[in-house]
Amino acid sequence: MWSDYHLEEKWMYRTIEEFKKAIENAMIFVALDADSEELLGMHCFRVNMKKKRAYSFYLAVLPKVHRQGIATKMIAYESEVLRRIGMTHIKSSTTTDANWSVQCHLKNGYKLIGFKKSDSDGHKSFIFRKQLEPVMLNTWSGVLAAIRHPIYSLYSSAFFCHCRFLYDYK
């Protein structure tokens, strides 16, 4: 695993089963190179339909393609998907020493709302929140926009629910 804040080091002391459990029932967005289908980035979300919010975790972009807009495009696409399924906001956290991730959150509409320190390992994180504009499905234009959105035409319903693949990052 890889990311701006060294997930490979973070997960080095955990098993693959623990990682699978962490992403179980998550909505996972994956960015692939359009030609080689190489994995360029991933971002996971947990969605709470009752509270209409999502929690973002494991934003990772392959280091060799940092600063090419991949995370920005993923966040824009994900925000739109989450907005269209009724989410009102996204919460996220990132380690305080992950400058790339902190800047990425701020650049993409997240507001810094807090700070936390893990009791177990002393890990320090910033907490972010991004407000999403509601979808106006009570208008014909809102309904048509939701129906025409690319997520409804590109993916089978079984696969769509778990992973979304984003192409053309060149």
Image: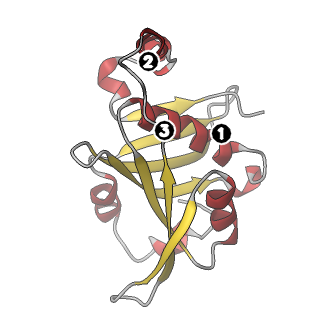
Coloration of the structure image: secondary structure
Q: How many marks?
A: 3
Can you give x and y, in whole percent of width and height, for residue 81 in the image?
46, 32
Tag 1: amino acid: Lys
Are circles 1 and 2 on residues that touch, CB within 8 Å? no
Q: Is 22 left or right of 11, judged from the image as shown?
A: left
Residue that label 3 marks: 133
Where disc 3 sits, the SS reads loop
- Give the Cα separation between the discs numbered 1 and 2: 19 Å
Label 2's element?
Answer: helix
Tell me the CA gap for discs 3 and 2: 14 Å
Circle 3 or circle 1, nearest the eye: 3
Q: Could you tell me which quadrant the C terminus lies in?
A: top right
Disc 1 packing (10 Å; few <14; some 14–19; many ≥20): some
Is 53 above or below relative to 135? below
Point out the frontmost of discs 3 and 2.
3
Within the image, what quadrant is residue 105 found in? bottom right
| Label 3 close to label 2 by CB (< 8 Å) | no
Could you say which disc has been placed on residue 73 in the image?
Answer: 1
Q: Residue 78: where, in percent of width, then height?
A: 51, 39
Q: Nearer the viewer, residue 134 or 163?
A: 134
Q: Residue at x 53, y 47 (%)?
A: 42
Q: Position of residue 128 (x, y in %)?
A: 51, 64
State the residue at coordinates (48%, 43%).
132
Mark 1: secondary structure? helix
Of marks 3 and 1, which one's residue comes earlier in the chain? 1
Q: Which residue carries the number 2 mark?
A: 146
Q: Amino acid at mark 2?
A: Ala
In this view, the residue in front, 17 or 76, is 76
Name the kind of residue labelled 3 in the image: Glu
Q: CA distance from mark 3 to mark 1?
A: 18 Å
